[in-house]
Amino acid sequence: MNKVLITGSLGQIGSELANALSERYGVDNVIVSDVRAKTCDDQISGCECAVLDVTDPAQIASLVKKHNIKIIYHLAALLSAVAEAKPQTAWNVNINGLYNILEVAREFGCAVFTPSSIGAFGLSTPHDKTPQETIQRPNTMYGVTKVAGELLCDYYHKRFGVDTRGLRYPGIISYKTLPGGGTTDYAVEIYYEAIKSKKYTCFLKPGTYLDMMYMPDAIKAAINLMEADQKKLIHRNAFNVTAMSFEPDMLAASIRKKIPDFRIDYKIDPVRQGIAESWPNSMDDSAAREEWGWQPEYDLEKMTEDMLTHLREKLVG
Ligand code: NAD
Ligand code: SER
């Protein structure tokens, strides 16, 4: 069994991917890592956890060599809102970190999974049914790093034969680990507040449509892509994937079916609103469906039911 390393493992996606990969491949075959040390609040159990800063190439090489790693899920990054607040750090982590991972992958023969994002698109991109291949002129540092990252991964595949693969994730919704400072975070926060106080003040305007996906589908997409027959992959590093598209009022209405007195009001954050308006309303993910069989399981109603059930257990007991 090839050993797997996850970077940025203590984040929203990594903490759930770590458990899924441990169940699939065995805890002894998964090494998790993050720039900070794991604490008892972190949701990961079983596998070995290392402190690894992806901006330090020597640290990556030493960990990969020590464990004979052959597959890297590279999740360490700054998300859109944090990246806009700290653009220099975002460049360093998102670009130099990725470059370091790809260089180590080239040297030690590792396959690499790297998530891109709906943030790789911009205002001049067609917003409805955004095609797989289209205009990509993002106006955020997050978007700049995501487009450059897609290109860098393609380059390492073509030039050096590194088995690089990736997805343009939409906003990911989950109940285990909180999101790390993105524009789509409202769609997670709203469920917590629905349980805690039956009301939520949203930082995006009503009518702001964005692609979204429930965490089990996000995990399934990453694993399915990495296990796909590489001969079938044309768009290796930047597959559009989506499960649903909604705006805040639709999400509130879905919650109201389960919590009838839930209320939403609005206090707009101009930075995150501006970012959201530059992103697609809905993506066309037919390339992922055709090339490796992408098929989401959760729609809005099924996700709301599951989120509220688990958050009640977590927050109320
Ligand atoms: P997150 O912010 O929850 O987690 C990122 C993790 O990276 C954190 O645990 C952080 O400590 C770690 N990290 C930061 N700097 C680091 C460094 N220098 N070295 C090592 N680790 C470092 O992010 P996430 O939501 O889990 O996202 C993972 C990936 O998926 C990112 O590339 C992100 O852009 C992408 N993505 C996420 C979403 C989403 O909605 N969550 C959507 C699209 C794309
Ligand atoms: N959820 C992510 C963000 O808002 C999208 O890449 O930053």
Image: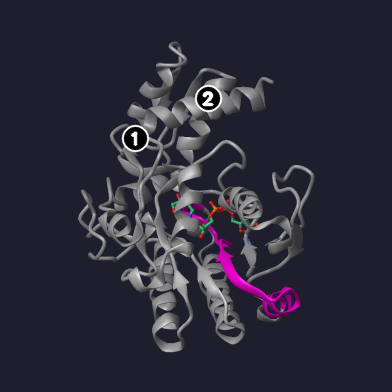
Horizontally, residue 213 falls left or right of residue 34, namely left
Q: Check the image and report above or below for 267 versus 222.
A: above
Residue 34 can be seen, yes or no? no
- Residue, disc 2: 308
Q: Nearer the viewer, mark 2 or mark 1?
A: 2
Is the CB of the residue bearing disc 1 within 8 angstroms of ligand 2?
no
Dividing the image into 4 quarters, which one contains the C terminus? top right
Q: Amino acid at mark 1?
A: Lys
Q: Position of residue 144 (x, y in %)?
A: 40, 67
In the rendered structure, which disc, 2 or 1, sits on the residue that comes first in sequence?
Answer: 1
Q: Nearer the viewer, residue 191 or 90?
A: 191
Q: Nearer the viewer, residue 2 or 254?
A: 2
Magenta segment, which residues? Answer: 59-81
Q: Quadrant of ligand 1?
A: bottom right
Q: Position of residue 260 (x, y in %)?
A: 43, 11
Magenta-colored stretch includes residue 62: yes
